[in-house]
Image (cartoon, rainbow, N blue to C red):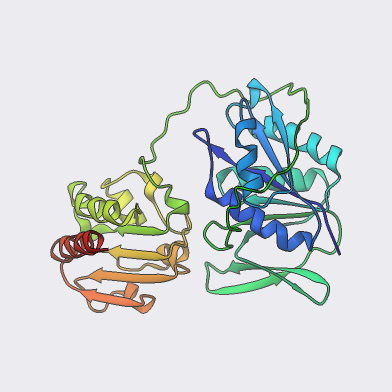
Protein backbone atom coordinates (compact mmCIF):
# COMPACT_ATOMS: atom_id res chain seq x y z
CA UNK A 1 0.00 0.00 0.00
CA UNK A 2 1.63 3.21 -1.20
CA UNK A 3 1.51 6.03 1.35
CA UNK A 4 2.39 9.69 1.52
CA UNK A 5 4.77 10.21 4.45
CA UNK A 6 6.02 13.51 5.85
CA UNK A 7 9.47 13.86 7.40
CA UNK A 8 10.29 16.81 9.66
CA UNK A 9 13.78 18.06 8.85
CA UNK A 10 15.34 19.16 12.12
CA UNK A 11 17.60 22.18 11.85
CA UNK A 12 20.31 23.06 14.33
CA UNK A 13 22.71 25.99 13.92
CA UNK A 14 21.76 26.43 10.29
CA UNK A 15 22.30 22.79 9.28
CA UNK A 16 20.15 19.69 9.15
CA UNK A 17 20.78 17.10 11.84
CA UNK A 18 21.85 13.70 10.54
CA UNK A 19 18.76 12.08 12.08
CA UNK A 20 16.69 13.96 9.50
CA UNK A 21 18.29 11.88 6.75
CA UNK A 22 17.77 8.71 8.77
CA UNK A 23 14.10 9.66 9.14
CA UNK A 24 13.85 9.87 5.33
CA UNK A 25 15.24 6.34 5.13
CA UNK A 26 12.59 5.21 7.63
CA UNK A 27 9.88 7.06 5.71
CA UNK A 28 10.82 5.24 2.50
CA UNK A 29 10.02 1.93 4.19
CA UNK A 30 6.75 3.25 5.62
CA UNK A 31 5.73 4.78 2.27
CA UNK A 32 6.07 1.43 0.46
CA UNK A 33 6.72 3.10 -2.86
CA UNK A 34 4.61 6.15 -2.12
CA UNK A 35 5.74 9.76 -1.76
CA UNK A 36 8.12 11.05 0.90
CA UNK A 37 7.72 14.77 1.55
CA UNK A 38 10.26 16.70 3.57
CA UNK A 39 9.06 19.53 5.81
CA UNK A 40 11.20 22.46 6.93
CA UNK A 41 10.09 24.95 9.58
CA UNK A 42 12.11 28.02 10.53
CA UNK A 43 12.93 31.63 9.83
CA UNK A 44 15.25 31.05 6.86
CA UNK A 45 15.55 27.36 5.98
CA UNK A 46 14.62 27.03 2.30
CA UNK A 47 18.31 26.73 1.39
CA UNK A 48 18.33 23.32 3.14
CA UNK A 49 15.53 21.83 1.07
CA UNK A 50 17.85 20.42 -1.59
CA UNK A 51 19.74 18.44 1.08
CA UNK A 52 16.55 16.57 1.98
CA UNK A 53 15.90 15.83 -1.70
CA UNK A 54 19.43 14.53 -2.26
CA UNK A 55 18.93 12.13 0.66
CA UNK A 56 15.69 10.72 -0.75
CA UNK A 57 12.80 13.15 -0.25
CA UNK A 58 10.63 13.42 -3.36
CA UNK A 59 9.79 17.05 -2.67
CA UNK A 60 9.92 19.57 0.19
CA UNK A 61 7.40 21.93 1.78
CA UNK A 62 8.87 24.97 3.54
CA UNK A 63 7.13 27.09 6.19
CA UNK A 64 9.12 30.21 7.04
CA UNK A 65 8.28 32.77 9.70
CA UNK A 66 10.41 34.83 12.08
CA UNK A 67 8.44 33.32 14.97
CA UNK A 68 9.83 29.89 13.99
CA UNK A 69 13.49 30.94 14.28
CA UNK A 70 13.68 29.11 17.62
CA UNK A 71 11.71 25.99 18.41
CA UNK A 72 8.55 26.32 20.47
CA UNK A 73 6.00 23.53 20.62
CA UNK A 74 3.02 25.78 19.87
CA UNK A 75 4.75 27.60 16.99
CA UNK A 76 6.02 24.42 15.32
CA UNK A 77 2.69 22.69 15.95
CA UNK A 78 0.85 25.45 14.07
CA UNK A 79 3.27 25.21 11.15
CA UNK A 80 3.25 21.43 10.90
CA UNK A 81 -0.52 21.14 11.36
CA UNK A 82 -0.95 23.46 8.39
CA UNK A 83 1.29 21.22 6.30
CA UNK A 84 -0.61 18.11 7.46
CA UNK A 85 -3.91 19.76 6.54
CA UNK A 86 -2.55 20.66 3.10
CA UNK A 87 -0.83 17.34 2.33
CA UNK A 88 -3.16 14.84 4.06
CA UNK A 89 -0.39 12.30 4.71
CA UNK A 90 -0.75 8.73 5.97
CA UNK A 91 2.41 8.95 8.08
CA UNK A 92 4.77 11.42 9.77
CA UNK A 93 8.32 10.58 10.88
CA UNK A 94 10.38 12.58 13.41
CA UNK A 95 13.80 12.09 14.91
CA UNK A 96 13.72 10.79 18.49
CA UNK A 97 15.33 14.01 19.73
CA UNK A 98 14.31 16.59 22.30
CA UNK A 99 12.29 18.34 19.59
CA UNK A 100 10.73 15.16 18.23
CA UNK A 101 9.86 13.83 21.67
CA UNK A 102 8.14 17.10 22.53
CA UNK A 103 6.30 17.82 19.28
CA UNK A 104 5.17 14.38 18.06
CA UNK A 105 2.89 13.44 21.02
CA UNK A 106 1.32 16.90 20.95
CA UNK A 107 0.33 16.50 17.30
CA UNK A 108 -0.62 12.84 17.55
CA UNK A 109 -2.95 13.60 20.44
CA UNK A 110 -4.49 16.56 18.61
CA UNK A 111 -5.15 14.38 15.54
CA UNK A 112 -6.38 11.43 17.62
CA UNK A 113 -3.61 9.17 16.32
CA UNK A 114 -1.25 6.73 18.00
CA UNK A 115 2.49 7.34 18.37
CA UNK A 116 5.31 4.82 18.27
CA UNK A 117 8.36 6.40 19.84
CA UNK A 118 12.06 5.52 19.94
CA UNK A 119 11.90 3.25 16.89
CA UNK A 120 15.06 1.24 16.16
CA UNK A 121 13.81 -0.85 13.25
CA UNK A 122 11.07 -0.90 10.60
CA UNK A 123 9.96 -3.75 8.38
CA UNK A 124 7.01 -4.75 6.21
CA UNK A 125 5.38 -8.02 7.31
CA UNK A 126 1.98 -9.48 6.54
CA UNK A 127 0.83 -6.31 4.86
CA UNK A 128 1.65 -4.23 7.95
CA UNK A 129 4.40 -1.75 8.77
CA UNK A 130 6.03 -3.26 11.87
CA UNK A 131 8.01 -0.96 14.17
CA UNK A 132 10.57 -2.29 16.66
CA UNK A 133 11.33 -0.33 19.83
CA UNK A 134 13.19 -1.10 23.08
CA UNK A 135 11.35 -1.49 26.40
CA UNK A 136 12.38 -2.07 30.02
CA UNK A 137 15.49 0.09 29.67
CA UNK A 138 16.63 -1.83 26.61
CA UNK A 139 16.34 -5.29 28.17
CA UNK A 140 13.68 -6.33 25.66
CA UNK A 141 12.12 -5.21 22.39
CA UNK A 142 8.53 -4.99 21.25
CA UNK A 143 7.01 -4.89 17.78
CA UNK A 144 4.06 -2.59 17.14
CA UNK A 145 1.78 -1.63 14.27
CA UNK A 146 -0.62 1.27 13.76
CA UNK A 147 -4.11 0.02 12.96
CA UNK A 148 -5.93 3.32 12.50
CA UNK A 149 -5.21 6.98 11.86
CA UNK A 150 -2.01 8.69 10.76
CA UNK A 151 1.20 6.82 11.54
CA UNK A 152 3.30 8.91 13.93
CA UNK A 153 6.79 7.62 14.76
CA UNK A 154 10.08 8.91 16.12
CA UNK A 155 13.31 7.15 15.10
CA UNK A 156 16.29 6.77 17.39
CA UNK A 157 19.47 8.30 15.90
CA UNK A 158 22.11 5.90 14.49
CA UNK A 159 19.71 2.97 14.09
CA UNK A 160 18.10 3.34 10.67
CA UNK A 161 20.55 3.88 7.84
CA UNK A 162 19.98 6.92 5.63
CA UNK A 163 19.90 6.54 1.87
CA UNK A 164 23.06 7.33 -0.06
CA UNK A 165 23.31 11.00 -0.97
CA UNK A 166 22.59 11.55 -4.65
CA UNK A 167 23.47 15.05 -5.80
CA UNK A 168 21.73 14.47 -9.12
CA UNK A 169 18.29 14.02 -7.49
CA UNK A 170 15.81 16.82 -8.03
CA UNK A 171 12.41 17.60 -6.61
CA UNK A 172 9.94 20.44 -6.17
CA UNK A 173 10.34 22.87 -3.29
CA UNK A 174 7.18 24.79 -2.37
CA UNK A 175 6.45 27.40 0.27
CA UNK A 176 3.36 27.30 2.44
CA UNK A 177 2.21 30.54 4.05
CA UNK A 178 1.09 30.00 7.63
CA UNK A 179 0.11 32.65 10.15
CA UNK A 180 1.89 31.79 13.39
CA UNK A 181 -0.05 33.49 16.16
CA UNK A 182 -0.95 33.43 19.85
CA UNK A 183 2.36 31.95 20.95
CA UNK A 184 2.39 31.14 24.64
CA UNK A 185 6.18 30.86 24.67
CA UNK A 186 8.68 33.31 23.23
CA UNK A 187 12.40 32.44 23.21
CA UNK A 188 14.45 35.50 24.12
CA UNK A 189 17.87 33.88 24.37
CA UNK A 190 19.37 30.41 23.97
CA UNK A 191 22.21 29.48 26.31
CA UNK A 192 23.99 26.33 25.20
CA UNK A 193 25.79 24.21 27.75
CA UNK A 194 26.51 21.33 25.39
CA UNK A 195 30.10 20.96 24.29
CA UNK A 196 31.03 22.10 20.82
CA UNK A 197 31.81 19.59 18.13
CA UNK A 198 30.09 16.30 17.41
CA UNK A 199 26.50 15.99 18.65
CA UNK A 200 26.53 13.38 21.43
CA UNK A 201 23.20 11.80 20.48
CA UNK A 202 24.30 11.32 16.85
CA UNK A 203 28.01 10.56 17.34
CA UNK A 204 29.43 7.42 15.74
CA UNK A 205 32.04 7.22 18.49
CA UNK A 206 31.45 8.07 22.15
CA UNK A 207 34.11 8.15 24.87
CA UNK A 208 32.36 8.27 28.24
CA UNK A 209 33.71 8.78 31.74
CA UNK A 210 32.37 7.82 35.15
CA UNK A 211 33.38 8.48 38.74
CA UNK A 212 36.67 6.80 37.93
CA UNK A 213 37.88 9.95 36.12
CA UNK A 214 38.10 11.47 39.64
CA UNK A 215 37.91 15.13 38.60
CA UNK A 216 37.05 17.63 35.90
CA UNK A 217 40.64 17.46 34.74
CA UNK A 218 40.29 13.69 34.50
CA UNK A 219 38.09 14.17 31.43
CA UNK A 220 40.93 15.77 29.45
CA UNK A 221 42.45 12.44 28.26
CA UNK A 222 38.95 11.30 27.23
CA UNK A 223 38.42 14.49 25.24
CA UNK A 224 41.73 13.97 23.46
CA UNK A 225 40.82 10.39 22.55
CA UNK A 226 37.38 11.46 21.34
CA UNK A 227 38.95 14.19 19.23
CA UNK A 228 41.35 11.73 17.58
CA UNK A 229 38.46 9.37 16.79
CA UNK A 230 36.15 12.15 15.60
CA UNK A 231 33.71 11.35 18.39
CA UNK A 232 31.96 12.94 21.33
CA UNK A 233 32.50 12.83 25.09
CA UNK A 234 29.77 11.53 27.41
CA UNK A 235 29.45 10.77 31.09
CA UNK A 236 27.64 8.69 33.66
CA UNK A 237 25.27 10.34 36.11
CA UNK A 238 27.80 9.70 38.86
CA UNK A 239 30.36 11.86 37.08
CA UNK A 240 27.79 14.59 36.53
CA UNK A 241 26.60 14.47 40.16
CA UNK A 242 30.22 14.79 41.29
CA UNK A 243 30.44 17.95 39.14
CA UNK A 244 33.21 16.55 36.96
CA UNK A 245 31.23 17.67 33.90
CA UNK A 246 27.97 19.24 32.81
CA UNK A 247 24.70 17.30 32.85
CA UNK A 248 24.40 17.89 29.08
CA UNK A 249 26.89 15.01 28.74
CA UNK A 250 24.89 12.55 30.84
CA UNK A 251 24.10 9.21 29.24
CA UNK A 252 21.56 6.88 30.81
CA UNK A 253 17.97 6.37 31.82
CA UNK A 254 17.63 9.99 32.95
CA UNK A 255 20.04 11.35 30.34
CA UNK A 256 20.68 10.83 26.65
CA UNK A 257 20.32 7.49 24.87
CA UNK A 258 23.15 6.82 22.43
CA UNK A 259 23.78 4.02 19.95
CA UNK A 260 27.19 4.73 18.41
CA UNK A 261 29.28 2.34 16.36
CA UNK A 262 31.90 2.45 19.14
CA UNK A 263 31.34 3.21 22.83
CA UNK A 264 34.38 3.44 25.11
CA UNK A 265 33.43 3.40 28.81
CA UNK A 266 36.20 4.74 31.04
CA UNK A 267 35.94 4.32 34.80
CA UNK A 268 32.23 3.48 34.59
CA UNK A 269 30.98 0.73 36.90
CA UNK A 270 27.94 -0.13 34.78
CA UNK A 271 24.88 0.75 36.85
CA UNK A 272 21.65 -0.39 35.21
CA UNK A 273 20.54 3.23 34.76
CA UNK A 274 23.65 3.96 32.70
CA UNK A 275 23.37 0.75 30.67
CA UNK A 276 19.86 1.80 29.64
CA UNK A 277 21.42 4.68 27.71
CA UNK A 278 24.23 2.88 25.88
CA UNK A 279 23.82 -0.92 25.92
CA UNK A 280 22.61 -0.98 22.30
CA UNK A 281 25.89 0.48 21.03
CA UNK A 282 27.32 -1.66 18.24
CA UNK A 283 30.74 -2.21 19.89
CA UNK A 284 31.40 -1.53 23.58
CA UNK A 285 34.89 -1.25 25.05
CA UNK A 286 35.16 -1.05 28.84
CA UNK A 287 38.19 0.25 30.76
CA UNK A 288 38.05 -0.26 34.52
CA UNK A 289 40.43 -1.21 37.35
CA UNK A 290 37.80 -3.46 38.92
CA UNK A 291 37.62 -6.80 37.04
CA UNK A 292 34.20 -7.44 38.64
CA UNK A 293 32.64 -4.19 37.37
CA UNK A 294 29.22 -4.75 35.85
CA UNK A 295 30.19 -2.84 32.70
CA UNK A 296 32.22 -5.86 31.58
CA UNK A 297 29.02 -7.90 31.37
CA UNK A 298 27.83 -5.85 28.39
CA UNK A 299 31.22 -5.05 26.88
CA UNK A 300 32.47 -6.64 23.68
CA UNK A 301 36.05 -5.90 24.76
CA UNK A 302 37.32 -5.27 28.28
CA UNK A 303 40.54 -3.74 29.53
CA UNK A 304 41.31 -4.17 33.23
CA UNK A 305 43.59 -1.29 34.10
CA UNK A 306 43.99 2.34 35.12
CA UNK A 307 42.18 4.54 32.59
CA UNK A 308 44.83 7.24 33.04
CA UNK A 309 47.39 4.79 31.68
CA UNK A 310 45.21 2.98 29.14
CA UNK A 311 43.45 5.94 27.49
CA UNK A 312 46.66 7.86 26.58
CA UNK A 313 48.09 4.61 25.16
CA UNK A 314 45.00 4.12 23.01
CA UNK A 315 45.15 7.73 21.88
CA UNK A 316 48.75 7.37 20.72
CA UNK A 317 48.01 4.12 18.87
CA UNK A 318 45.02 5.64 17.10
CA UNK A 319 47.14 8.63 16.11
CA UNK A 320 49.67 6.26 14.53
CA UNK A 321 46.94 4.42 12.67
CA UNK A 322 45.57 7.68 11.29
CA UNK A 323 49.02 8.77 10.12
CA UNK A 324 49.62 5.45 8.36
CA UNK A 325 46.12 5.20 6.89
Picture coordinates of residue 225, whole percent (x, y): 25, 56
Nearest the viewer among 40 and 182 is 40
Whether residue 255 is visible = no
User: Image quadrant of residue 115?
Assistant: bottom right
In the picture, measured across the screen, residue 200 lies left or right of residue 290, that is right
Q: Quadrant of the N terminus?
A: bottom right
Vertical relation: 162 (above or below) 76? below
Q: Pick out the residue farthest to the front.
A: 168
Vertical relation: 147 (above or below) 184? below
Number of numbered tags placed on the structure image:
0
Picture coordinates of residue 185, whole percent (x, y): 62, 25
User: Image quadrant of residue 151?
Assistant: bottom right
Picture coordinates of residue 210, whole percent (x, y): 28, 59
Nearest the viewer among 159 and 44 is 44
Vertical relation: 148 (above or below) 196? below
Residue drawn at x 64%, y 27% is: 68
Picture coordinates of residue 249, whole percent (x, y): 37, 48
Vertical relation: 37 (above or below) 135? above
Residue drawn at x 26%, y 50% is: 223
Residue drawn at x 80%, y 34% is: 82
Nearest the viewer among 282 and 257 is 282
Residue drawn at x 60%, y 47% is: 167
Q: Quadrant of the C terminus?
A: bottom left
Whether residue 35 is visible = yes
In the picture, measured across the screen, residue 156 lies left or right of residue 189, that is right
Q: Pick out the residue farthest to the left.
A: 309
Amino acid sequence: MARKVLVLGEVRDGSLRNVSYEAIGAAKTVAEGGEVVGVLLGASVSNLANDLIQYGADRVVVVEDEKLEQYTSDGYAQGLLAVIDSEQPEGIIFGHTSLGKDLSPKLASKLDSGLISDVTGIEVAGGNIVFTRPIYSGKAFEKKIVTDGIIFATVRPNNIAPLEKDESRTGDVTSLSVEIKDLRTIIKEVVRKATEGVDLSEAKVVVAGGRGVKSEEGFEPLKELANVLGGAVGASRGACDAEYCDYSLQIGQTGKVVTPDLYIACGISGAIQHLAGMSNSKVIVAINKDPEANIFNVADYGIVGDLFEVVPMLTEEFKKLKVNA
